[in-house]
Image (spheres, rainbow, N blue to C red):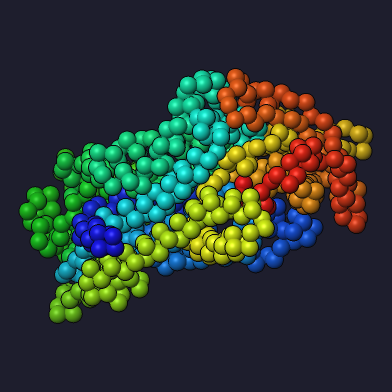
Amino acid sequence: MLSALLTAIQAQLNRKVSATGLGLFRIGFALVALQEILFLFYFRHLIFDPVPYLDRASPVLHVFLLVWLGVLACLALGYHTRRVAVANYLFWVVFVVFTPMWQDFDGGFDQLMTASSFLLIFLPSERALSLDPLRWTWRYSTTSQRYSPIREVPLLAYTLPLALTLGLLYFDSGLHKLSSEFWRNGMGGWLPATMPYYVSPLDMSPLLNIRWLEQAIGYTVIVFQLVFLFLFWFRPFRVPLLILGASFHAGIILTLNVYPFGFAMLVHYLLLVPFAWWRGYSRWIRCTRPLLTVFYDQECPLCNRTVIFIEHFDIRHAIAFKGLQSHAREYRALDVIPEATLLTDLYALDKQERLSAGVDTYIQILLKLGYTAPLGWLLKIPGIYRLARAIYRRIADGRQRQPCGEHCAVTPLPGWEHERPFAGFLARHAASDRQIAWRISKILVVVLLLQLNSTLHYGVLYRWAGARPSDPVLALLDQASDSVINLSHTFFGISPHALYLHDHFDHYNDIVALTYRDQAGQEIWLPFINQEGRLLSPNWGRIQSMWANVAITSHMSRDRLEKFTKKVTAFYGVEMGIDLSDAEFVIKSKRVEVPTSWVVDLRHRNFQGEWRDIGTLHWGRDGARLVVPHLPGDEHQLHDQGAESGPHRMP
């Protein structure tokens, strides 16, 4: 088995493909992470403060979030890509481990981001749509010789993240879905979309009320997740898998309020796009012939750097550069200009052979590049044009020319960082691609064992240990497996994906909302949950997970209810200007239905339920005091006492 794995990995290492999809994946991943860190910064007091605004977390956390934003901006731009990928991975690990993000504000999103962040350290994603090739070309080119960075990557750079971050996740999740009754009834995609805590503002009832469609979607999701890992390797299946998978996650984004997870999964499908599509798009946008021919001084280092810079961003190949010393006399428009004058400016000829020089050349370049045309129009404004012309003249007249001699030889680029398929310890100490393949094979075996432990833990050990709590052997195995999961979850994002199954929705018949009662006795709904029971924007993503998966569950506890109602009321109390030295918040509850079989128009029925007051949270000078005589769902918890299997560690 290991020999077959080694052969397959080596074959994929040796096959070189376009890096465009990998570059787009890096950009998409960085943008998803960037919006999430902006989200964390916006809710930093709610998430990180023990009591928002009243008992504050260290302000160093806020500084780290700002640094993290800078790291992700560099990752999106592809600037020092491998270094910032390492920094991004460390940020995910540190924040997940040492802040409440894991225990209180996690919904499966952090595991995915940790796993992908780890892989990005090794993937050569900087070879496309990145500033790193520009940086290398500037560094290792001379006036006589141009350095050409590698633009292709091994096929393994695409298949490895697809197998590990999508394939294993799907397979694990699909196996767990088979144990859930409402998933077996085909209602797995329907039920969360009818629960007020999970739905987006977009009313999908016309689709939710078509029973056969919802069942088809539910069963298709299970089959898709079980077969993805085994089929995506084969070309005939890639486009169908791409269409199905992208449709499912687009549906999650539109239907549910866990959009960060939907977008994070969706960007991985950029790795499944056929390479022919990227080549076709490149041919479609590429100019059949240059729109502008620019002439530059071949012996000027600044001019050469300018040419390298413009060519890097000329994705349409609209500009052709030619050296004045070699080509000037081939063109009649330049033939009448003395050589000494030619070398003082940057000249250009368009398709109609109209001549431009200096700032006008740069304006024409910006216009012909296409996406930079607004900058070209801006430079044409009289005042700006005059300033740009003065700056250009000063730089052009002050530049130094450097006639090429023996010193113009290109300095070689360090081999392991750029020439080898995978950077780091895998490549630096390997003499051949076969050795790299061998090391990757061994690492993949370890990953498979960690994933197997994760799947068996929740699917078998967790349930057996709960059913037989007095068995010491099962208890020991459960604890050992759980310890391994904690490590694999923390550093590699490998953990059970048994999310939103029957364990979570069974008896989840009560939801809770909060209002503020002012001095006149009037109740004001906090901008958190509305009268329908929906969480309002921007309280989605991990805030939704905190409230719907941790604070309010089918097995609600008084301690959790007090902890999170204090957090929410303190956060929004300060935001609304409420004096928390004497304030009363009303805790409301209403019943909802969570059936395992289809019910017509359930979304609207759950919205229309009646709210009842079940208690209060009173803020005074000594803090907050929760008064709730009876928790929602107490009746079924008493009925099920002794029948439930162990603590519910998974949502």
- Which residue is drawn at the image coordinates 30% and 75% (left, top)? 428
Q: Residue 621 location, x and y as percent? A: 91, 55
Q: Is residue 351 left or right of residue 628?
A: left
Q: Residue 338 location, x and y as percent? A: 13, 60
* Front residue of this view, candidates 416 and 558: 558
Residue 84 falls in image quadrant: bottom left
- Which residue is drawn at the image coordinates 73% and 35% (left, top)? 510
* Front residue of this view, candidates 309 and 102: 102
Say if 598 sits above or below 33 in the image.
above
Say if 142 sits above or below 519 in the image.
below
State how many labels appear: 0
Residue 104 in view (yes/no): no
- Which residue is drawn at the image coordinates 79% and 29% (left, top)? 611
Residue most extreme to the bottom: 406
Residue 296 in view (yes/no): yes
- Which residue is drawn at the image coordinates 85% and 45% (left, top)? 617
Q: Residue 398 location, x and y as percent? A: 31, 69
Say if 90 sits above or below 222 in the image.
below
* Front residue of this view, candidates 161 and 594: 594
* Front residue of this view, candidates 196 and 442: 442
Residue 371 falls in image quadrant: top left
Quadrant in which the N terminus appears = bottom left
Residue 273 falls in image quadrant: top left
Q: Residue 397 location, x and y as percent? A: 29, 66
